[in-house]
Image (spheres, rainbow, N blue to C red):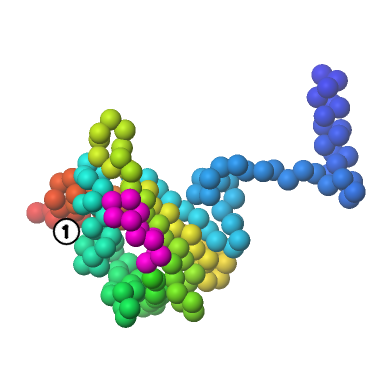
Amino acid sequence: RGSLEQTAGRKARRQRDPVHPPEEEHDSAPGRTARTLGFGGYQVVGRTVTIAAEAAVIHEQFCDPARLNAVLGGHLRVEPAAGGRLLWVLEVNSHRIRMETVVVHDRPGEMRAWRSIEGAGVDVEIKVQLRGAPAGRGTEVEAHVAYRPKWGLAGHLAARLRGIDPKAQGSRALKRLKMLLETGEIATAHNRR
């Protein structure tokens, strides 16, 4: 009992003492799982899903804008732009957010990554990594998005409330990709009879 009181007393003194400020909590978790999502002003989100398909087939989905649009669905689409770039268009009500990106890494069957160009509406980095799943169950698809919301934390929270934040969009896209590659179609309410 005495040691608990001593520890609490030391902690209280450190919090009041400007010479010896309290030690900051260090979060050693990787970016997308850390308790704090601010990495140099970037919000980092990600998700991993196992898909019963070969890595080369999955990689092809991310190389062709038409195939990528089938997977993205909803509010987000891509359009080819000059110089092999992609224009990502997010439609929210009557407002459009455009992000022009360039491929920065492309290793077929392993990884594809995009980065927004200088002066794009949103500073974003998107990376999709592929690796064999345990026990030969297909391929693990890991997607990460690091972005700087236009209006900082307020912009991030507003996007999250509308369901258009990168975490929701990425989760939805990976779910759609899994359905498409494993069943040959994407189940939606429009498919019901």
Q: Does the magenta stretch include residue 104?
A: yes
Of residues 115 and 2, the one nearer the viewer is 115
Q: Relative to residue 147, is residue 181 depicted above or below?
A: above
The magenta segment: 103-114
Give the quadrant of residue 193: bottom left
Give amino acid for label 1.
His
Q: What element carries label 1?
A: helix
To which residue does mark 1 refer? 190
Q: Main secondary structure of the magenta part?
A: strand
Mark 1 residue crowding within 10 angstroms, few (<14) / some (14–19) / many (20+): few
Name the outermost residue toward the front.
107
Q: Is residue 62 visible?
A: yes
Residue 162 is left or right of residue 61, and the answer is right
Residue 185: percent from the left, percent from the top? Answer: 15, 52
Q: Is residue 32 magenta?
A: no
Give the quadrant of residue 97: bottom left
Q: Relative to residue 130, is residue 6 depicted above or below?
A: above
Name the outermost residue toward the top.
1
Residue 119 is left or right of residue 100, and the answer is right
Query: Which residue shows up at 37% across the image and 50% down it?
Result: 129
Query: Which residue shows up at 23% across the image and 51% down it?
Result: 56
Query: Which residue shows up at 50% across the image and 49% down it?
Result: 32
Residue 91: percent from the left, percent from the top? Answer: 35, 72
Residue 180: percent from the left, percent from the top? Answer: 19, 52
Of residues 136 and 46, the one nearer the viewer is 136
Q: Relative to residue 160, is residue 56 depicted above or below?
A: above
Residue 133 is left or right of residue 126, and the answer is left
Query: Which residue shows up at 13% across the image and 50% down it?
Result: 184
